[in-house]
Amino acid sequence: MGSTGDRVAARERGWQKATREAGTAVRERERAARRFAAARAQRDAAEQAMAAVLRELVDTTGMLKTAAAIVGVSFEEAERLTDELGGDLLPGEGGQK
């Protein structure tokens, strides 16, 4: 059996290791949160750009279905994106959804 000093030193090393590991976990979690926020901002910017293009195409074609087909998104996705812009858009050819 080791001396009391050895046991205290071993316990201290254990605490230091646990503290280091906890700090690493916190930093990794913070990095992941920053990456997630950056990805969300990038997605939001892309959606805003796509919504603006859809709006321009709807202004040109007068039809949301046609604009959605040109952009390459589903009609439902086009509706969602343009709903965020607001305003009245024609749903599709002949006013049919």
Image (tube, rainbow, N blue to C red):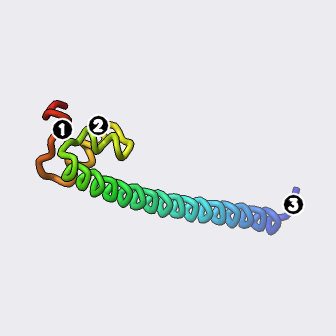
Q: Nearer the viewer, mark 3 or mark 1?
A: 1
Q: Which residue is mark 2?
A: 75
Q: Secondary structure at mark 3?
A: loop
Q: Secondary structure at mark 1?
A: loop
Q: CA distance from mark 3 to mark 1?
A: 81 Å
The amino acid pointed to by label 3 is Gly
Q: Residue furthest right?
A: 1
The amino acid pointed to by label 2 is Phe
Note whether 50 is above or below 67 in the view shown: below
Q: Which residue is mark 1?
A: 91
Q: Identify the residue shown where x is 52% and y is 58%.
A: 32
Q: Nearer the viewer, mark 3 or mark 2?
A: 2
Query: Marks 2 and 1: CB-CB under 8 Å?
Result: yes
* Mark closest to the chain's N terminus, 2 or 1: 2
| Residue 92 screen position, x and y as percent | 20, 36
* Mark closest to the chain's N terminus, 3 or 2: 3
Q: Which residue is mark 3?
A: 2
Q: Quadrant of the C terminus?
A: top left
| Residue 38 screen position, x and y as percent | 45, 62
Q: CA distance from mark 2 to mark 1?
A: 9 Å
Q: Identify the residue shown where x is 12% and y is 51%.
A: 87
| Residue 68 screen position, x and y as percent | 31, 42
Is residue 12 toward the left or the right of residue 67 in the image? Answer: right
| Residue 94 screen position, x and y as percent | 14, 33
